[in-house]
Amino acid sequence: MADRTLWSYADIAAHIGVRTETVRSYRKHGLLPPPDAVEGGRPFWYADTVRRWSAQRPGNRPRDPRR
């Protein structure tokens, strides 16, 4: 079942372990997918959208457990 929970910049930042400003910069530079919804002029993304994007973004490789 799809997760249609809407996530803000802050939610995305917490999920990927960066600052909110970093996520805003990702969007400004076209590195985030388009928002799934805009409410009151603020963009929001479905949790599933963010999880798919996060799994595919550069630098998001599994860590070597020996390190």
Image (cartoon, rainbow, N blue to C red):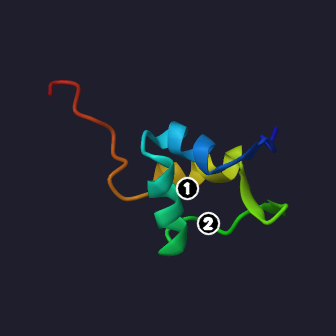
Left or right: residue 2 compared with residue 32? right
Question: Is the residue under label 2 in contact with that under label 1 (CB below 8 Å)?
Answer: yes
Real-space CA distance between mark 1 and mark 2, rounded to the nearest whole angstrom: 7 Å
Q: Amino acid at mark 1?
A: Trp
| Type of amino acid at the residue the image marks with label 2 | Pro
Instruction: Determine which quarter of the picture holds residue 57.
Output: bottom left
Image quadrant for the N terminus?
A: top right
Q: Position of residue 39 (x, y in %)?
A: 85, 59
- Residue that sits furthest to the left in the current view: 67
Q: Which residue is pictured at 15% across the width and 24% down the height?
A: 66
Residue 63 to residue 10: above or below: above
Mark positioned earlier in the residue sequence (1 or 2): 2
Relative side of 67 to 26, left or right: left
Placement of 42 over or under 6, stated as above or below = below
Label of residue 33 in the image: 2
Does 32 sit left or right of 66 as displayed? Answer: right
Q: What residue is shown at x 47% (from left), y 65% (from top)?
A: 25
Q: Residue 60 location in percent, x, y?
A: 37, 48
- Front-lying residue, 12 or 41: 41
Residue indicated by mark 1? 53
Please tell me whether mark 2 sits on a helix, a strand or a loop: loop
Residue 53 in percent (x, y) is at 55, 56
User: Could you tell me which quadrant the C terminus lies in?
Assistant: top left
Instruction: Looking at the picture, tell me which residue is in the foreground, 16 or 53.
Output: 16
Q: Position of residue 33 (x, y in %)?
A: 61, 66
Identified at 47% across, 75% down, the residue is: 29
